[in-house]
Image: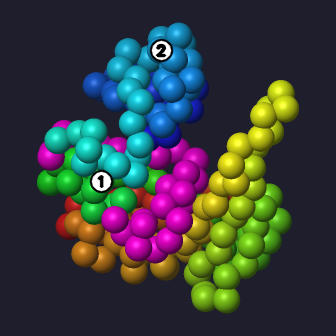
């Protein structure tokens, strides 16, 4: 999900059936041009509209775009939809930034939230004079993520931290 230019998709398709999704038509064309066999334009926050129940055995969202869910409720809905399109024995891997980590305020576009375990990043992109709409990402600490997954069909099986500490990868398994 959020396949970008396909670095991971190209690797995965050598070993597994891989469906790369991107919301951007331009990125889907780039994925295809780079050799991704099954690149589709789809919104990761509208999975039920794009895929049937039990379609995938695993899901991977590298980067912190899951934060684009915007809120804990939005994240809970995303995880519920992800549970719908994955099998009962599925694993999902999602990345996040921990707003409780001491280095989190160094993140580009970081904004604190008064609630423990929550924060935001807000920024935009500019390329060749074109300016994107502001991108708002909800930051959720691993402990808050454990709360958010309740009732979604998932549980947090493992948290792996990056070298900088604020970046983490969550391994989710079905309950």
Q: Quadrant of the C terminus?
A: bottom left
Q: Quadrant of residue 112?
A: bottom right
Does residue 32 appear in this view? Answer: yes
Q: Quadrant of the N terminus?
A: top left
Q: Nearer the viewer, residue 134 or 103?
A: 134
Q: Which residues are magenta?
A: 53-77
Q: In this figure, which residue is indicated by the disc labeled 1?
A: 82
Instruction: Write the residue at 60% across / 68% down.
Output: 139
108 on left or right of 171: right
Q: Are there few (<14), some (14-19), or many (20+) residues within 10 Å of tag 2?
A: some
Q: In this figure, which residue is indicated by the disc labeled 2?
A: 32
Instruction: Write the residue at 28% across / 56% down.
Output: 81
Q: Are there few (<14), some (14-19), or many (20+) residues within 10 Å of tag 1?
A: many
168 on left or right of 81: right
Does residue 107 appear in this view? Answer: no
Cα–Cα gap, marks 1 and 2: 24 Å
Numbered badge on residue 132: none
Q: Nearer the viewer, residue 129 or 82?
A: 129
Instruction: Write the residue at 15% across / 45% down.
Output: 54
Q: Position of residue 96 (x, y in %)?
A: 56, 60
Image coloring type: rainbow
Vertical side of 83 occupied by 26: above or below: above
Q: Position of residue 162 (x, y in %)?
A: 64, 56
56 on left or right of 61: left
Q: Quadrant of residue 153?
A: bottom left
Q: Quadrant of residue 38?
A: top left
2 on left or right of 164: left
Vertical side of 12 occupied by 120: above or below: below
Residue 163 belongs to the span the image colors magenta: no
């Amino acid at each position: 999900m959020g396949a970008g230019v396909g670095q991971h998709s190209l690797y995965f398709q050598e070993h597994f059936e891989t469906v790369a999704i991107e919301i951007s038509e331009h990125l889907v064309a780039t994925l295809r041009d780079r050799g991704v066999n099954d690149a589709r334009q789809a919104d990761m926050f509208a999975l039920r509209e794009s895929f049937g129940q039990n379609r995938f055995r695993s899901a991977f969202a590298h980067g912190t775009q899951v934060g684009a869910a915007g809120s804990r409720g939005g994240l809970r809905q995303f995880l519920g939809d992800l549970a719908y399109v994955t099998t009962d024995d599925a694993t999902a891997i999602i990345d996040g930034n921990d707003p409780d980590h001491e280095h989190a305020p160094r993140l580009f576009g970081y904004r604190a939230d008064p609630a423990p375990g929550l924060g935001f990043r807000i920024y935009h992109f500019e390329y060749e004079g074109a300016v994107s709409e502001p991108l708002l990402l909800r930051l959720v600490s691993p402990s808050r993520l454990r709360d958010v997954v309740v009732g979604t069909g998932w549980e947090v099986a493992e948290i792996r931290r990056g070298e900088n500490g604020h970046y983490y990868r969550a391994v989710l398994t079905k309950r």
